[in-house]
Image: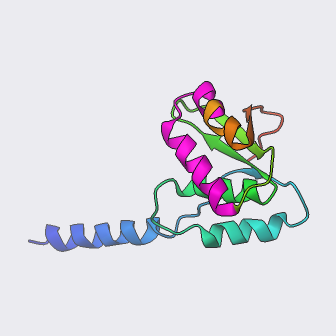
């Protein structure tokens, strides 16, 4: 009987902790508003949603910065916009392309026509 209360307590602890996890993914500054945009994008990305990190990345890209996104194969790509995007549109674009992408070609083919450029991971640029 003591196992049930312990399991319930542990479950509540895990759920409580994971809802507060940061949405932030590695990003590169693209302008003077970078610190404010980090906070804005984290605060406007709702907790508990699917692709929270990808939505944060889209928000930062729409603000003029670049963000790293990892696809299913473990490859990482720096995403930048090649034309301006509304924040919500960029969040949806990055999240949708992430869901269907298995590698560089599918990720690039999905984002390219939508007005984004991707760059494969480069250890000289990628700093966490």
Task: Examine the image and state in which quarter residue 113 appears.
Answer: top right
Q: Main secondary structure of the magenta part?
A: helix
Across and down, in percent, residue 54 comes to 59, 51
Which residue is nearer to you in this view: 24 or 4? Answer: 24
Magenta stretch contains residue 89: yes
Question: As rendered, which of 46 and 97 lies closer to the eye?
Answer: 97
Q: Residue at x 80, y 48 (%)?
A: 83
> Residue 89: horizontal and vertical position, in percent?
64, 57
What percent of the width, then of the height, locates residue 115?
73, 43
What residue do we see at 63% from left, 30% from top? 109
Q: Is residue 101 above or below residue 47?
A: above
Question: What's drawn in magenta, residue-wise?
Answer: 87-108
Residue 15 visible here: yes
Of residues 81 and 104, the one drawn nearer to the viewer in this rendering = 81
The quadrant the N terminus occupies is bottom left
Question: In the orientation shown, which residue stands out farthest toward the front?
Answer: 113
Q: Is residue 11 above or below residue 94?
A: below
Q: Residue at x 58, y 67 (%)?
A: 45
**Visual colour scheme:** rainbow
Q: Could you tell me which residue is drawn at 63 percent across and 73 percent down?
A: 43
Residue located farthest toward the right when viewing the structure as drawn: 32
Image quadrant assignment for residue 87:
bottom right
Horizontal arrangement in the rendering, residue 29 relative to residue 23 (left or right) = right
Instruction: Say how many tags the image has.
Output: 0
Decide whether residue 22 is among the magenta residues.
Answer: no
User: Is residue 24 shown to the viewer in this render?
Assistant: no
Q: Quadrant of residue 36?
A: bottom right
């Amino acid at each position: 009987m003591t196992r049930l209360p312990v399991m319930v307590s542990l479950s509540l602890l895990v759920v409580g902790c994971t809802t507060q996890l940061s949405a932030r993914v590695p990003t590169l500054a693209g302008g003077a508003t970078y610190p404010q945009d980090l906070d804005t994008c984290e605060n406007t990305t709702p907790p508990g949603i699917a692709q929270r990190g990808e939505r944060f990345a889209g928000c930062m890209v729409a603000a003029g910065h670049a963000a790293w996104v990892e696809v299913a194969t473990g490859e990482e790509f720096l995403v930048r916009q090649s034309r301006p995007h509304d924040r919500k549109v960029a969040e949806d674009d990055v999240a949708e392309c992430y869901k269907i992408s298995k590698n560089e070609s599918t990720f690039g083919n999905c984002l390219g026509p939508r007005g984004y450029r991707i760059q494969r991971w480069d250890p000289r640029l990628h700093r966490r």
